[in-house]
């Protein structure tokens, strides 16, 4: 597991703890959390672009639920990422 994969998995697990389970975490919220780390904790994703982190998160989510619809997952992650970016101006 790469550092990126580990860091994304940690974010997903922490969100699941806060939301009461993985099934309770909307993909848009994952996107918002990723954005938050890029802005507030940039060391976590040093040398990584947001598209890479979103792709890894999409693969983790798809694997958890054994689904293959990565494009839809990516759209929801990007929607959340962009909403968080827009909220801070």
Image (cartoon, grey):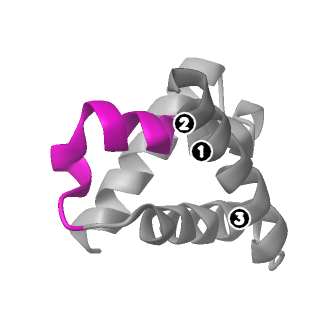
Of pointers 3 and 1, the one earlier in the residue sequence: 3
What label sits on residue 72 in the rendered view?
none
Q: Secondary structure at mark 1?
A: helix
For the residues labelled 1 and 2, say whether their Cβ atoms are less than 8 Å apart: yes
Taking depth in this image into account, of 64 and 32 the one nearest to the observer is 32
11 lies above or below 3: above
Taking depth in this image into account, of 36 and 82 the one nearest to the observer is 82
41 with respect to 73 (left or right)? left
User: Which stretch appears magenta?
Assistant: 33-47
Residue 22 visible within the image: no
Q: Quadrant of residue 47?
A: bottom left
In x, y percent, where is residue 5? 36, 66
| Residue 39 is covered by the magenta coloring | yes
38 with respect to 69 (left or right)? left
In x, y percent, where is residue 19? 64, 22
Q: Please tell me whether mark 3 or mark 1 is closer to you in this view.
A: 1
Tell me the distance, in whole angstroms, between the alpha carbons under discs 1 and 2.
6 Å
Tell me the distance, in whole angstroms, between the alpha carbons under discs 3 and 1.
10 Å
Q: Secondary structure at mark 3?
A: helix
Q: Which residue is mark 2?
A: 85
- Residue drawn at x 42%, y 42% is 11
Tell me the distance, in whole angstroms, between the alpha carbons under discs 3 and 2.
16 Å
Q: Which residue is mark 3?
A: 74
For mark 1, does the 10 Å Cα neighbourhood hold few (<14), some (14 to 19), or many (20 or more) residues?
A: many
Q: Which residue is mark 1?
A: 81
- Residue drawn at x 65%, y 60% is 61
Q: Considering the image in quadrants, where does the N terminus appear?
A: bottom left
The overriding secondary structure of the stretch rendered in magenta is helix
31 with respect to 52 (left or right)? right
- Residue drawn at x 18%, y 58% is 46
Q: Quadrant of residue 36?
A: top left
């Amino acid at each position: 597991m790469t550092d990126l994969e580990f860091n994304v998995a940690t974010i997903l697990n922490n969100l699941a703890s806060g939301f009461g389970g993985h099934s309770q975490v909307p993909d848009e919220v994952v996107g918002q959390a990723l954005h938050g780390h890029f802005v507030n904790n940039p060391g976590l994703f040093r040398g990584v672009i947001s598209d890479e982190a979103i792709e890894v998160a999409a693969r983790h989510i798809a694997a958890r639920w054994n689904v293959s619809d990565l494009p839809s997952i990516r759209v929801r992650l990007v929607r959340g990422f962009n909403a968080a970016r827009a909220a801070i101006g």
